[in-house]
Amino acid sequence: MNLLMDTHILLWWLADDPKLTESERSAIADVGNLVVVSAVVIWEIRIKQALGKLKIASNFYRVVHQQGFELLSVSPDHAYAVGDLPLHHRDPFDRMLVAQAATEGLTLITHDDIFRKYDIPVLSV
């Protein structure tokens, strides 16, 4: 399975947060799965940190790299695909994750039910 992590999923994984279910932990830890972190997730985390809404370790980016996750940049194809999405909600970070999941054939791992309204595979509780 090819997984794209939502922002809260990455943060919960790094913090070993019990909100992450055992099946989600297993899917992320499974070496047979490709686990992807979008540049959008890194961007959102850094914005929240800069605004004082989130505290992260100073070595956060290095820790993400050490996890062995695939990093996904935002491409022009992803940006273009956002325009074809229905307006179920307006969060630009979430919309880009949907576009990336659709374009790249990834399953989004999230606890946010809004993603189920889109035509993408979602792994959630």
Image: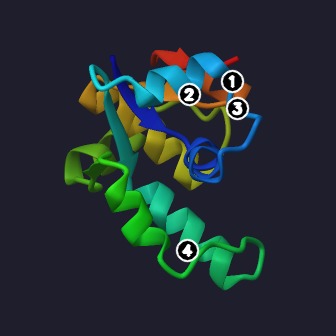
Q: CA distance from mark 2 to mark 3?
A: 17 Å
Q: Residues within 10 Å of mark 4 (few under 14, many from 20)?
A: some
Extreme-left residue of the structure: 76
Q: Residue 18 appears at what percent x and percent y? A: 76, 36
Residue named by callout 1: 21
Question: Where residue 112 is drawn, which disc sits there?
Answer: 3
**Secondary structure beneath label 3:** loop
Residues at discs 1 and 2 in contact (Cβ within 8 Å): yes
Residue drawn at 65 percent across, 77 percent down: 49
Name the amino acid type tagged 1.
Thr
Name the amino acid type tagged 4.
Arg
Mark 3 vs 1, N-terminal side: 1
Q: Nearer the viewer, mark 1 or mark 4?
A: 1
Name the amino acid type tagged 2.
Arg
Q: Residue 84, can we see it?
A: no
Q: Nearer the viewer, mark 2 or mark 4?
A: 2
Name the amino acid type tagged 3.
Asp
Q: CA distance from mark 1 to mark 4?
A: 25 Å
Relative to 56, is 37 above or below? above
Q: Residue 51 appears at what percent x and percent y? A: 72, 82
**Secondary structure beneath label 1:** loop
Residues at discs 1 and 4 in contact (Cβ within 8 Å): no
Q: Residue 45 appears at what percent x and percent y? A: 58, 66
Q: CA distance from mark 3 to mark 1?
A: 14 Å
Mark 4 vs 3, N-terminal side: 4
Q: CA distance from mark 2 to mark 4?
A: 24 Å
Residue named by callout 2: 25
Relative to 26, is 91 above or below? below
Residue named by callout 4: 46
